[in-house]
Image (spheres, rainbow, N blue to C red):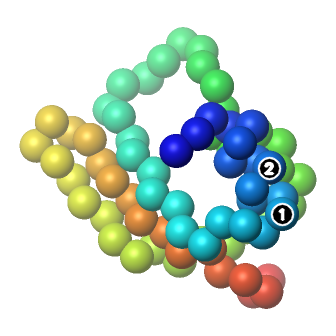
């Protein structure tokens, strides 16, 4: 849980093992980026994708270390 600045700080320090991202089926005209200027590529392995009846999608990822 947290905003883009908190996620960015933890990703930069390699302190994230797993990410759970929810996508809400709504396009906003503006907002806060989920991953704001991290400055490096971070590879993810998809663990699970779940779609709910209301259109919400849950995506579970594992952060892959040392793979380029």
Q: Nearer the viewer, residue 11 or 39?
A: 11
Which SS class for mark 1? Answer: loop
Is 60 or 14 nearer to us in this picture?
A: 14
Q: Secondary structure at mark 2?
A: helix
Q: Which residue is mark 1?
A: 13
Residue 59 image position (x, y, % from top left): 39, 59
The total number of labels drawn is: 2
Instruction: Pinpoint residue 35: horizontal percent, then vertical percent.
Output: 69, 44
| Residue drawn at 68 percent across, 37 percent down | 4
Q: Residue at x 30, y 49 (%)?
A: 57
Q: Split into 4 quadrants, where in the image is the C terminus?
A: bottom right
Q: Residues within 10 Å of mark 2 (few under 14, many from 20)?
A: few
Q: Are circles 1 and 2 on residues that touch, CB within 8 Å? A: yes
Instruction: Using a 10 Å C-alpha cutoff, classify the residue at mark 1 as few (fewer than 14 neighbours), some (14 to 19) or many (20 or more).
Output: few
| Whole-percent x, y for residue 22 in the image | 39, 46
Give above or below for 67 relative to 44. Answer: below
Q: In this rendering, is residue 64 above or below 18?
A: below
- What x and y, as percent, mark residue 1? 52, 44
Numbered mark located on residue 29 in the image? none
Q: Is residue 21 above or below residue 23?
A: below
Q: Which residue is mark 2?
A: 9
In the picture as drawn, the residue positioned furthest to the right comes out as 39
Residue 33 placement: quadrant: top right
- Residue 12 relative to residue 23: left or right: right
Q: Residue furthest top?
A: 29
50 sits to left or right of 24: left
- Say which residue appears at 79% left-offset and 86% top-offset: 66
Cα gap from disc 1 to disc 2, whole angstroms: 6 Å
Which residue is the extreme one toward the left? 53
Which residue occupies 26% across, 41% down?
56
65 relative position to 52: left or right? right
């Amino acid at each position: 849980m947290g905003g883009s600045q908190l996620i960015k700080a933890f990703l930069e320090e390699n302190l994230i093992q797993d990410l759970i991202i929810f996508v809400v089926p709504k396009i906003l005209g503006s907002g806060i980026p989920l991953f704001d200027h991290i400055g490096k590529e971070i590879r993810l392995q998809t663990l699970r994708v779940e779609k709910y009846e209301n259109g919400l999608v849950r995506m579970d990822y594992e952060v892959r270390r040392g793979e380029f």
